[in-house]
Image (cartoon, helix red, strand yellow):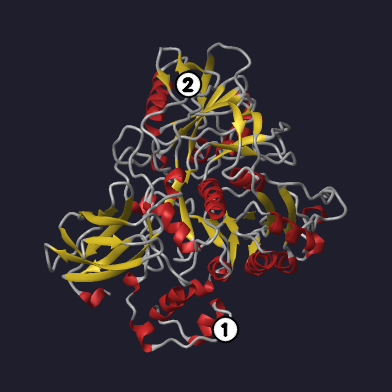
Amino acid sequence: MVLLSRVLYGGKPTLVKISSLEILTRVSGRNQRALEMKGMAQFHQSGEGYVKPMITLFAIGARYFDKGYAAFFNASTTDPSLFSARDYEGHGSHTLSTAGGNFVPGASVFGMGNGTAKGGAPRARVATYKVCWPAILIGGCFDADILKGFDLAIHDGVDVLSVSLGGGSDNYFEDSISIGAFHAVNHGIVVICSAGNSGPADGTVTNVSPWLITVGASTMDRDFPAYVELKNGQLFKGASVSKPLGEEKFYPLITGRQAKFANASASDALYCESGTLDPQKVKGKILVCLYGDNGFTDISEQAAEAGAVGTVICNDEDNGNQIFAEPHIIATSQINYTSGLALFAYINSSNNPQGTIKAPKTEYGLKPSPLMASFSSKGPNPVTPEILKPDITAPGVDVIAAYSGAISPTEGNYDKQRTPFITFSGTSMSCPHVSGVVALLKAIHPNWSPAAIRSAIMTTARRRDNTGHPMLNGSLVKATPFSYGAGHLRPNRAVDPGLVYDLTVEDYIHFLCALGYNQTIIQIFSNHTYSCSKSARRLHIMNLNYPSITVPKLLNSVTVTRRVRNVGSPGKYSAHVQPPVGVSVTVEPSTLIFMKTGEEKSFNLTLTTKRPGVDGDYVFGELIWSDRVHYVRSPIVVATTATLANT
């Protein structure tokens, strides 16, 4: 279990700098005994990383996979204590406890957010599969180790796989997560993956295979404000979970550029990069730095090493107005771009600029929330634009969960602090929220397929915030399904969705056929030889029975087909459409009558552009099937095109 909270690409196509693979099993005595018998307690037996094998009621074991990593880097040159299932970086502890952690009263991060912590499925039995290791020049996660992790999880009989890791590939058959997940789904295992942290740019979403549940990240209504007050009375709201200043008084303020060594780069010093700060200029002051691509805690560590009493981290223009509560080694507050401009203006116009950082506190009831996280990767799907990704969003900002005692909260050697809980932000954090809900749904509906569970989660999601208005992004602009998929997770509604859009493994194989994959490639995914029929080759990708409807190149008119199954009581469902701007939408039939549970009905959705021959941007709408008790929502995503020559 490795902490690498930002999903980054490695140096080669087959290498990705990613984190742990966790599994979550349904509450089942059969499964617990099966995992015990299959040798799940596979811990390293010596060295610093040794953990005594122990099977408890809930945490029933761990495995690790390192042969791919060790072969590439030569295991003799690395620290042998790392070759164990122990978490040395905190990421795995955080994600696993978010998915299936038990009830823990009095949980907090240095006193902030105090309360009872629990995972999404706190009574679930969990096991961990560690597939990633410290990066040495290039990424520390290898396809061989990832695929072996999937293989053993399938062998061990798990029910849910929570995969807080990701990379990228132009083809599904070159993506180890996609391949491993296909085999898992073939065994009835639900696989949930993080969407990636490369937002807010379009087309950055990862883990886009249609057999996955892909999760974006959004905020909660809880906040950890750490206000920055200036001597002239100005007050800026920041965020932090660091310890407060030693004294409540005003301190001199200095920017990184003002504090640089004479031979240091002014631009590097502005971001407080390593080796740029002169301790003689910094000592006893609050250092003001820009945040760009450098890490939050890296900045405050540089400030601490230079002798600063505190740090104010100001977003640069690219990072905008979304801020995050991070732990720091000294008193620190991150403020947004707008506040940063005002702070720099004050420092540059004052002969003796002074300020202070108020102690962080916890606030609830924040409005509007949820907001989409600025870092959350967005659609359109870069591999198959006919499939909307991400599928769903869930809390992924300032999430409090368990942390490893093997490392400091800032991850730096300079920091000697330790904490059992920490705040992390990322789609790695939102992914296990959904995984916990999936585990509960699997327990309530053990016969539902992975696709049916995904449908229940998507079609019951919420697109509005706690003010009743459409969800916004980090810049307070209206978000779209490219950010949140079907919307924000609503667990209780997902238990009783009314109707589901189901898919079988054969449907996914037909999807691969429609992509033009040959028998050799399909055999990578399938356990048996499969020859694509002519009908499978002719299948239009848009007709995959997905809970969302995406037409990336609408020339004039197109008709897509969907099939729904009744998982509730007999009833009559009527179609309600909010069409995308400039597109007319008709549903045939517009009424579906179900006489019994399990009955299936098909319908056609015809989309027609009102401006034929025009290249247009993506526009968004929705289809709702309702019996006045259930509201089965599906996003509609359309972009018009002037010619099919581009398809």
Check disc 1 and report its element: helix, strand or loop.
loop
At 69% from the left edge and 33% from the top edge, which residue is drawn? 419
Q: Position of residue 189 (x, y in %)?
A: 57, 63
Q: Position of residue 501 (x, y in %)?
A: 38, 63
Q: Quadrant of residue 387?
A: bottom left
**Cα–Cα gap, marks 1 and 2:** 61 Å
Which residue is denoted by mark 2 in the rendering? Answer: 227
Tell me the crowding category of disc 1: few under 14, some 14 to 19, or many 20 or more residues within 10 angstroms, Cα based: few
Residue type, label 1: His
Up-down: is 111 above or below 54? above
Please identify the quadrant where the C terminus is shown.
Answer: bottom left
Q: Position of residue 473 (x, y in %)?
A: 36, 42
Q: Position of residue 574 (x, y in %)?
A: 24, 56
Up-down: is 272 above or below 332? below
At 45% from the left edge and 43% from the top edge, which residue is drawn? 492
Residue 601 appears in view: yes
Q: Is residue 516 left or right of residue 90?
A: left
Q: Are marks 1 and 2 in contact (CB under 8 Å)?
A: no
Task: Please give the label number shown on residue 88.
Answer: none
Residue type, label 2: Tyr
| Closest to the observer, 3 or 102 | 102
| Closest to the observer, 505 or 420 | 505
Mark toward the viewer: 1 or 2: 1
At 38% from the left edge and 68% from the top edge, which residue is drawn? 384
Up-down: is 413 above or below 636? above
Which residue is denoted by mark 1 in the rendering? Answer: 528
Check disc 2 and report its element: helix, strand or loop.
loop
Tell me the crowding category of disc 2: few under 14, some 14 to 19, or many 20 or more residues within 10 angstroms, Cα based: many
Q: Quadrant of residue 97?
A: top right
Up-down: is 617 above or below 493? below
Residue 201 appears in view: no
